[in-house]
Amino acid sequence: MQTHASIQARPPLSRRARTLWLAGLALVMAAIFSVDTTTHYEVAAAVFYTLVVLIAARVLRGRALLWLAVWCIGLSVFSFALTPHGDLHAGLINLAISITAIIMVAWLVIKMEAARDAAHAAQAQLLRLARVKRLDGLTTAIAHEVNQPLAAIVTSGHACQRWLGQDPPKLAKAELALNRILADAARASQIVTRVRSLSRGEPVQAVAFDFNAAVMEVLALSTDELERHGIELALELAGNLPRAFADPVQIGQVIGNLLLNAIEAMADKPDKAHVLRVGSILKEDTMILTVADSGAGIPAEIQAHLFDAFWTTKADGIGVGLSISRTMIEANGGQIWAESAPNGGAVFSISVPVEPRP
Amino acid sequence: MSEHPAPLVHLVDDDASVRAALEDLMASVGLSARVFASVAEFLAEPLPDAPGCLVLDVRMPGQSGMEFQRQMHALGIHLPVIFITGHGDIAMGVAAMKQGAIEFLTKPFRDQELLDAVWNGIELDRKRRAEAAALADLRSRWDSLNPGEQSVARGVVQGLLNKQIAAELDLSEITIKVRRSHVMRKMQAKSLAELVRMMEALPSAV
């Protein structure tokens, strides 16, 4: 989830907040319009429409912003036409300046947003690349480590065959070779155990923490991604939850992974209005977080492999996310499971133990 | 130098298990092997006077096998090299063969592949050693000639008559004849043609 940590993350904007913002902007526009209309021609209140465009950049993007600018220009011209008195000549010049300012500001804002998007995409790709590279180095190292005892086993096996094939068979020599084979097999198995503990990562450092706050923290990091793909966020967090008892960093990583998966699933179907539902509930002595997307869902034949390592349906995926997530959650005394939502889409859930009562 | 010293395989691999297994595989087909954990260890001991080949791991701590192969000739080590590697790619194999390796095997490999390469390497080294020994022998025979005899020998292989050599060296024809017979005897040449061939093999002599 560090993917976006370095990019300035704006606090999440719910649909309601967005509506409020837009209503506020409409009010400001109305105020500018009335001042512009009721005063003399030469009072250039229309130039303040640039502020509207600038502020609107926070909630509107691309084409919508362009339409807003067109509206602002239209309103300027309309209020000019309605204005009954003042210096017409100066008014015309002021109107022209206002319109030019609005166009320039809108153009600059759109350009800026595009540049920001490009920088964002480039950084995200770099991070993904770094992640794959790191994994590549790791697998090479593991492959080399396991290959050495394997090579020794194969060679000793051949030697053993040759000792046995001699006339008379050299049993003592063959036995020595067999002992070496067993020792090397034990070594290979130790390496595998080490690798598995490696993928389990840091030992679990369980502490009591506010579960909903942890969820919100990870969500704040995903805001850019949600916004970029036009995904609406529906939060259904239970109030008055007891504190969770687990490793907050690992739980955060798992939640981040689930969110990223959900966003990717929905980004794959861009021609649909998407909702990401994140909910928490208390069930006996565990807390359950559900992350539901409105993507393609989970086909039955995939369900069985969902949590397998190196198994992926993504073109550029490596298939370790859910596998690592499961290892982490289980190490924290929780569980992870997936279901298909009745309306399509996938629902991933994790359970996390609550703080034991003293 | 004994007439037919037993061949010797030199194995350099940083992995103790692989070393032990390879040494045992060689033993199972009656080949003696010396094993080393690194190039430095291999260089620390004098190279026995026996035909052999060098089985080198590509990736080792310290000097890598590929790096060492590039420096071997400068160090006067002419053993044929067989590379073994745990992570061989085609590019690496091509580079190794271009450098003169006789085989490039990816672990784990079939025993027969390695043994074939080893026997092939030993045979190549035997031939190279025989040629080198013959040349050294020839050189010592040439060095046993005194300067006067050497100048007569040069004249002879140029196809000059005794009379012409005598004129050139400002000596009597009898002296040339005596020296010529010394040359044939010391060089152990049975005919003029054989002497010419010997002289051709000694580029510095002519």
Image (spheres, coloured by chain):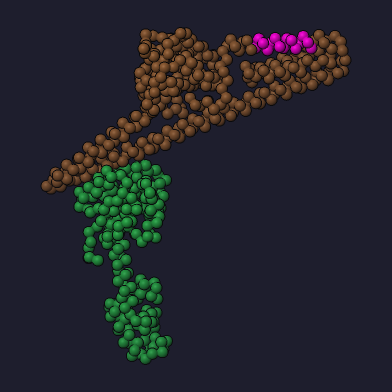
Chain colours: A brown, B green
Residue B30, percent from left and from top: 20, 52
Residue A98, percent from left and from top: 77, 19
Query: Is B161 or A278 nearer to us in this picture?
Result: A278
Residue A340: quarter of image: top left
Magenta segment main secondary structure: helix
Residue A144: quarter of image: top left
Residue A158, percent from left and from top: 23, 43
The relative height of residue A316 versus residue B45 in the rendered view (above or below) is above
Q: Is residue A27 magenta?
A: yes
Residue A205 seen anywhere in this rendered image of the structure: yes
Residue B188: quarter of image: bottom left
Residue at 22%, 65% in the rendered image: B2
The relative height of residue B111 versus residue A201 in the rendered view (above or below) is below
Query: Is A84 or A43 nearer to us in this picture?
Result: A43
Q: Residue placed farthest to the front in the image?
A: A358
Residue at 79%, 12% in the rendered image: A36
Query: Is A165 or B53 nearer to us in this picture?
Result: B53
* Range covered by the magenta-colored residues: A22-36
In the image, taking residue A84 as reference, residue A196 lies left or right, namely left
In the image, taking residue A238 as reference, residue B157 lies left or right, namely left
The relative height of residue A199 versus residue A91 in the rendered view (above or below) is below
Q: Is residue B23 magenta?
A: no
Residue at 68%, 12% in the rendered image: A25
